[in-house]
Image (cartoon, rainbow, N blue to C red):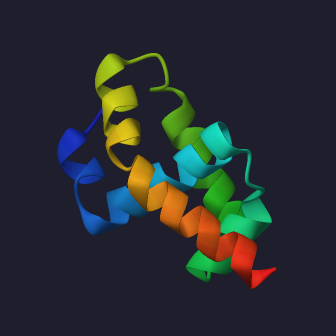
Amino acid sequence: MLNKKFLKTDIGKKHVIAYGLHVNYHVYYKDIAKYYGCSSTTIGYWIRNLKKYSHLKDFVCIVESYDSDMKMILNNIQNME
């Protein structure tokens, strides 16, 4: 079951942004992990857990609401390289 309250918290926001970066912008796990300062297996775990909600309209709206944050992080990741 989709927990919208969790996805609105700071930790949930990290999960959704990692999911959006990987699915929408095709950023590798290792690059997202380097940005967040964690392992790529952690990022993979977050993304795999959220993929089961990809068909829900509410989840898609939540991911789209963080699009500006994803673009900012994408620019930061590209500048790190």
Q: Does residue 30 appear in the picture of this structure?
A: yes
In the rendered structure, the answer to whether residue 79 lies left or right of residue 7 reads right
Farthest residue to the right: give it.
Answer: 81
- Residue 61 lies, with reference to residue 56, above or below; the image says below
Which quarter of the picture shows residue 37?
A: bottom right
* x, y percent for residue 60: 39, 28
Which quarter of the picture shows residue 32?
A: bottom right
The residue shown at (28%, 25%) is: 58
* x, y percent for residue 20: 54, 45
Q: Which of the image's four quarters has the N terminus?
A: top left
* x, y percent for residue 38: 63, 78
The residue shown at (50%, 38%) is: 50
In the rendered structure, the answer to whether residue 80 lies left or right of residue 70 reads right
* x, y percent for residue 51: 56, 32
Q: Nearer the viewer, residue 35 or 70?
A: 70
The residue shown at (22%, 40%) is: 4
Q: Nearer the viewer, residue 4 or 20?
A: 20
The residue shown at (50%, 66%) is: 72
Q: Which of the image's four quarters has the C terminus?
A: bottom right
Which quarter of the picture shows residue 36?
A: bottom right
- Residue 24 lies, with reference to residue 78, above or below; the image says above
Farthest residue to the left: give it.
Answer: 5
